[in-house]
Image (cartoon, coloured by chain):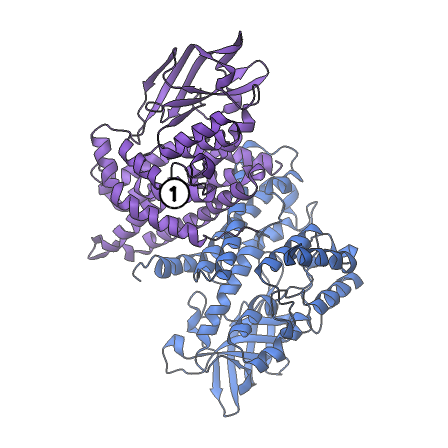
Chain colours: A purple, B blue
């Protein structure tokens, strides 16, 4: 029976990750990247790979550290606290989980390249303004022994610099997932840097050739491979947002203790104390949902959908509250670009939309709970 | 088969054989609860059989030590116990303030003799206890209790008044906060006394509430003699016991109030009993409430697991109490909305839904208001200055 309590290994992993990120990827580092128009830090990713983070979900025989989903959530949570930028979610969580569902030599090799930090991936799934995999229109028409892909994708997170793309396409009798190099003929993209200074891109696919080799899993059956990958991504994103909430909250409580107005620390005012306390309660409840999602993905992945959607919905809601209260309790300084709180707010907004917003996950919960 | 699997298998057989069919409806309404006590009138033979059989196995208080009437279950076994009870939709055989509040306090602070004297009768449902904490002048400022115990050598002579003493009119014993030192600072002059309500100096008077029922009472003490051995913990250190007990009370209110801890029916399904198609706004509110309910249920589990792992979350009860009760109020607001005009009568097509709704308004007041809970979190967890 898995426990809703951090194991010793997880606590150690969190401590180690925090130590590393405070040194190698503090918020000031993110600010520097933003100021220089950079959305990637390949050297940082290499370091993360060396620590086993890129291979967190890659089997040991393929060169990974295979620590599991709860551990991936721990890492994502710590990254959220310092707003560390990396291809962790797209590559180490989503792509690795998808590839793990396939047991052939090619997938094993691809997993090895993920674990070593050589290969990065982006998931090309959204076509409209909201997450809706089932509504995929990008067409992969049968053509001889292979396919031709035509259509568009947007909000492809990490798309501008990814080596490979996982593309969800409509085939004759369903949806099919393709794993292709990002520079294949006919693939065009435009960078669409989001408010959180992260890399996303719009893609167009024009008569892009794909072979049976490029299909991940079975034709017309993308979800066997993709559903676990999406759920792992949703859980890790929720963990990142929970970490982000905690980071913003720590800043805010710190400010309440030092900022003086009317001759006293503003943290003495009950109006602010109760709001800060309420926010802490929300963060605590969300932490339970995150931990549970990791435990379910590790122990019973086929039944994890409810746990994952609760986690993503709660994390979205809590992060929103954390950054709104963060800015408000900081007052004017919270609105300035020179102060970090705005970074948390922007990342929270992007995280809210990626891989399904609150309403999407609330509908999932409702469906799974029978209403 | 692991020990836990064996335990589950044996428990399942025992439940099948011993839980009466009538007790398998999972009902948690006031009418369905077995509170026990010396004057308890069982609503059916099944209710009595279920209590007697469960008590004989220690299953009324499954985690208490066997020598005090429990079954001595560890945390894993306790989880299995609740899962198997839920599988059968079995009613809880006995509920009481003795189980939820006094028991944990006695297990922590009581002497061995006190445990032997008071715990087994609670476990068997023979004695019903109530709680004497609040006073007319001591609500959120609970430590301001004025009910006085004068030291008379071998006993205290108690005089004063308590209020909001739930079910005082149905209980035969009361655990109460009594001021035994008027000179000391307010937190340091309180003792935790066990008082026999059959003493002629104890009087109770029910208070009619907005929900139409009278679970709360005023309780008056006039020259009541309380023997010295009926103190829990040290003299004038009753506040420690009181606070410890409050954490259990708060967890009980947060979890018990909405049946939030696992197994509960989905809110959407409950609402659909009344409305065939939930309108969009109500449905959206219900989804949010459902997500929060499940997440708070997980938090209850997490804190229990943490406690077992020795990772203290000392002030967790304030958080759970605040979040759980506020959510329960929302839940009942939604049930009223779904019930429409059918929910507006005292005994209408939906039973006493309005009474239940009104009752929940006390959830965020009793056992410490939401505002007091937030102040506790602010001070003890966030370290904000008082």
Outermost residue, top side: A144
Q: Is residue B370 above or below residue B168?
A: above
Badge 1: how crowded within 10 Å, few (<14), some, or many (20+)? many
Whole-percent x, y for residue A222 in the image = 54, 23
In the figure, residue A117 lies in which quadrant? top left
Q: Secondary structure at mark 1?
A: helix
Whether residue A24 is visible here, answered yes or no, is yes
Q: Is residue B334 above or below residue A133?
A: below
Q: Is residue B284 above or below residue B75?
A: above
Whole-percent x, y for residue A252 in the image = 29, 48
Whether residue A340 is visible here, answered yes or no, is no
Whole-percent x, y for residue A342 in the image = 28, 37
A362 on left or right of B86? left
In the figure, residue B340 lies in which quadrant? top right
Q: Which residue is mark 1?
A: A75
* Nearer the observer, B144 or B101: B101
Q: Residue at x 32, y 59 (%)?
A: B383
Q: Residue at x 55, y 37 (%)?
A: A305
Q: Chain of mark 1?
A: A
Whole-percent x, y for residue B316 in the image = 45, 58
Give the total number of marks visible in the rendering: 1
* Nearer the observer, A50 or A83: A50
């Amino acid at each position: 029976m898995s426990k809703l309590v951090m194991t010793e290994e997880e606590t150690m992993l969190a401590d180690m990750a925090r130590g590393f990120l405070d040194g190698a990827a503090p918020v000031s580092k993110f600010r520097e990247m933003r100021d220089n128009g950079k959305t990637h830090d390949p050297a940082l990713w290499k370091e993360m790979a060396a620590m086993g983070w890129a291979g967190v979900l890659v089997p040991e025989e393929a060169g990974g550290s295979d620590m599991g989903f709860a551990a991936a959530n721990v890492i994502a949570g710590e990254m959220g606290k310092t707003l560390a930028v990396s291809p962790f979610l797209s590559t180490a969580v989503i792509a690795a989980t998808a590839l793990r569902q396939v047991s052939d030599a090619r997938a094993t090799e691809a997993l090895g390249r993920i674990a070593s930090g050589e290969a990065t991936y982006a998931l090309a799934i959204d076509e409209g303004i909201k997450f809706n995999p089932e509504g995929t229109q990008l067409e992969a028409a049968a053509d001889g022994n292979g396919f031709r892909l035509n259509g568009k994708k947007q909000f492809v997170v990490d798309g501008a610099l990814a080596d490979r793309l996982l593309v969800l396409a409509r085939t004759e009798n369903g949806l099919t997932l393709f794993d292709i190099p990002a520079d294949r003929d006919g693939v065009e993209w435009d960078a669409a840097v989001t408010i959180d200074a992260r890399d996303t891109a719009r893609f167009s696919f024009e008569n892009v050739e794909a072979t049976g080799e490029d299909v991940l899993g079975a034709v017309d059956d993308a979800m066997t491979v993709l559903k676990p990958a999406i759920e792992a991504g949703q859980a890790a994103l929720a963990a990142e947002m929970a970490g982000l909430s905690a980071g913003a909250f720590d800043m805010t409580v710190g400010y309440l203790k030092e900022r003086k107005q009317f001759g006293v620390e503003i943290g003495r005012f009950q109006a602010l104390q109760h709001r800060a306390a309420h926010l802490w309660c929300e963060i605590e409840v969300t932490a339970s949902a995150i931990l549970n999602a990791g435990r379910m993905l590790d122990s019973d992945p086929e039944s994890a959908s409810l746990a994952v959607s609760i986690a993503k919905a709660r994390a979205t809601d809590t992060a929103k509250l954390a950054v709104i209260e963060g800015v408000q309790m900081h007052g004017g300084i919270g609105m300035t670009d020179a102060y970090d709180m705005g970074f948390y707010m922007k990342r929270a907004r992007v995280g809210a939309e990626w891989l399904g917003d609150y309403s999407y996950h609330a509908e999932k919960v409702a469906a799974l709970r029978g209403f | 088969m692991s020990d836990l699997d064996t335990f589950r298998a044996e428990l399942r057989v025992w439940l099948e054989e011993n839980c009466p069919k009538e007790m398998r409806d999972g009902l948690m309404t006031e009418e369905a609860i077995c509170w026990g006590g010396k004057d308890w009138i069982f609503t059916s033979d099944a209710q009595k059989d279920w209590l007697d059989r469960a008590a004989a196995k220690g299953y009324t208080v499954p985690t208490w030590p066997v020598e005090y009437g429990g079954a001595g279950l560890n945390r894993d076994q306790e989880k299995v116990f609740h899962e198997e009870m839920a599988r059968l939709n079995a009613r809880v055989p006995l509920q009481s303030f003795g189980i939820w509040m006094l028991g944990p306090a006695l297990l922590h602070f009581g002497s061995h003799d006190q445990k032997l004297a008071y715990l087994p009768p609670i476990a068997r449902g023979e004695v019903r206890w109530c709680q004497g904490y609040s006073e007319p002048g001591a609500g959120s400022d609970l430590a301001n209790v004025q009910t006085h115990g004068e030291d008379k050598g071998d006993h205290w002579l108690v005089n004063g008044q308590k209020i909001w003493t739930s079910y005082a009119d149905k209980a035969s014993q009361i655990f109460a906060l009594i001021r035994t030192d008027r000179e000391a600072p307010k937190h340091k002059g309180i003792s935790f006394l066990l008082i026999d309500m059959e003493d002629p100096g104890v009087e109770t008077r029910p208070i009619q509430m907005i929900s139409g029922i009278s679970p709360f009472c005023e309780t008056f003490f006039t020259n009541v003699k309380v023997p010295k051995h009926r103190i829990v913990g040290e003299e004038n250190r009753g506040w420690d016991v009181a606070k410890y007990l409050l954490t259990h009370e708060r967890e009980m209110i947060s979890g018990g109030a909405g049946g939030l801890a696992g197994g509960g029916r989905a809110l959407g399904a409950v609402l659909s009993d009344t409305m065939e198609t939930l309108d969009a706004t109500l449905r959206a509110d219900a989804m949010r409430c459902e997500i929060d309910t499940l997440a708070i249920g997980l938090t209850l589990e997490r804190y229990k697991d943490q406690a077992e792992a020795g990772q203290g979350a000392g002030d967790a009860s304030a958080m759970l109490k605040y979040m759980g009760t506020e959510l329960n109020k929302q839940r009942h607001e939604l049930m009223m909305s779904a019930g429409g005009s059918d929910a507006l009568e005292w005994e209408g097509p939906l039973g006493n839904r309005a009474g239940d709704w009104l009752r929940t308004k006390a959830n965020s007041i009793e056992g410490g208001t939401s505002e007091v809970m937030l102040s506790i979190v602010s001070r003890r967890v966030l370290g904000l200055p008082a």
